[in-house]
Amino acid sequence: MKVLHELNKERHGDRAGNYLAAMVDNRLKSLDYVLYNPHQVEFIDYLHPDGRRTYVRSLSFLLQKAVREVFPTAQLRISYSVGNALYCDLVFPDNREETTEDLEKLTAAMLRMVEKNIPFRQEKIPTENAKKIFSDNGFPQKALLQKTRGHFFTSVYYLGDTADTFYGPLVPSAGYLTLFNLCLFHKGFLLQYPHPDDPQRLDGPPRLHRLVEIFEEHVQWGNIMGVKDIGTLNQKIQQGLTKDLILTTEAFHSRRYAEIADKIYRHRDRLKLVLIAGPSSSGKTTTSKRVATQLKVLGLKPVVLEMDNYFLDRENTPRDENGEYNFETIHALDVPFLNHQLTDLLAGKEVEIPYFDFFTGKRSFRGKKIKLGESQILIMEGIHALNPALTEDVPSGVKFKIYASALTSLSMDENNGISTTDTRMVRRMVRDAQFRGVTAEETILRWPSISVGERKNIFPFQEQADVMFNSALLYELAVLKTHAEPLLHRILPISPAYPQALRLLKFLSYFTPIFPKEEKYIPYESVIREFIGTSRQD
């Protein structure tokens, strides 16, 4: 019998503190896990995505404990990620706002716990007992989530006498959490953690105020709808309110599409090209079609040009440092040819549009020709649409730029958000399996390179958009659950994708499913149709 942290010290000596968790037979385990038999063990550090998640979860608990000590009457809310940070706020009894002095006190309390190396510990207890602990500690959302999930036992974590729950392992003790920062931001503050590529570096405060405003808008709307977390979403579904939830959420989206079209219409005399960008599986294709429909209502004649059709043939696609095809770089597109066609189109010439076949990896021409006439406007979507290099031959004054992303406004509970990246990965997994002949295993294994590409090629340009659109739907993960789970279950335990498959299966297990027979309420023009297709019951 041996505890993982003992084995870690034996293997790594003075460097043992760099390792935050371990893969035991391809399953993520905390370093207090006890080995009774021979196992395959791989220790992971901050550079590993699961190591990073372990660090951030533990850091969140450290902040929670500090708030309990310094401001015992305040409630901490941890909402969502903003760059390499978590957006937080404190709810004081007198509704005052946080100050720099408040954050200095919290930082000092956190550093004291780091210096004392206070241990984290975990207990698995009956869910009824856990619900009482959470309710008594002012965590009604946590209690509701455990109730609607319907499991007999729940894992409860302790830091000193403070109890909480998290959806994955923590580091062994506070002494591992040596690098963080608190800074005022927007209407709250940020809990900053190290850069994903450099555990010794913190970024400066992100300049993403517009993105946060979009998040806040959806959070407020979710509160109005009575759906602010997984527990309240599950309640709606369990109470038979799925149809109303779907239709109301879709109506909210329709209103936003119309508002974007109104902005374009007001500048119709100069605008000739609408560019729609966003990270993978953010709903760019649907956004382009829905905006086009709203422009038609206003009397314009939009023409949609899909950027995916300008991919280079597969054999000409650049490769990354691992020798794999890099589909996320702008150089995977035939940029000179695209600019040539755009210039011709905006000059009133007719062009033949290419078609890219994802199954064969080939671009071909099928006789589809377009020409812009009077009252017509060109709409083009793709992950690089906001990169000036993509349309460098097109004058900036004729462009209108839209940034779309799936900024999930739901939270798991009071201080555990839902990763927008996970939402997009589940979307892509379902879509790729249905329409692109790509397995869930392949999607998971490609995702690290996708994420690197997004950080390099997409996120730096998002604040340059004229308007931002949040394509997330309150109910979508309950729908995606029934599509994604069978795909994830097919991934074998020996696969390098298996740990992520287990993590996503656990995440999806918290949702009450919206079954295929209820998908008939989802409009055919909904963004979720881009990923699930038409209902299996239609």
Image (cartoon, helix red, strand yellow):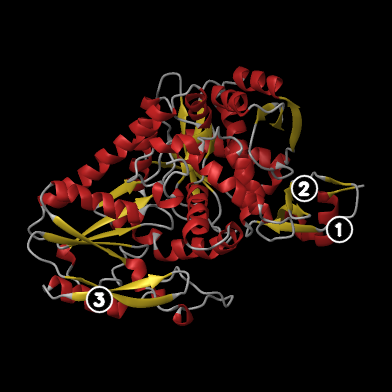
Q: Quadrant of residue 113?
A: top right
Q: Earlier in the sequence, mark 3 or mark 1?
A: 1
- The answer to whether residue 38 shows anywhere in this view is yes
Q: Is residue 465 above or below residue 226?
A: below
Front label number (3 vs 2)? 3
Amino acid carrying mark 3 in the image: Asn
Quarter of the figure with the C terminus: top left
- Left or right, 209 with respect to 16, comes to left
Q: Residue at x 35, y 65 (%)?
A: 384
Q: Quadrant of residue 512?
A: top right
User: What residue is disc 3 on?
Assistant: 339
Q: Residue at x 50, y 60 (%)?
A: 451
- Left or right, 216 with respect to 39, comes to left
Front label number (3 vs 1)? 3
- The answer to whether residue 187 shows anywhere in this view is no
Instruction: Classify 10 Å Cα crowding around label 3: few (below 14), some (14-19), many (20 and above).
Output: some
Q: Nearer the viewer, residue 271 or 51?
A: 271
- Left or right, 13 with respect to 429, comes to right
Q: Earlier in the sequence, mark 3 or mark 2?
A: 2
User: What residue is disc 2 on?
Assistant: 31
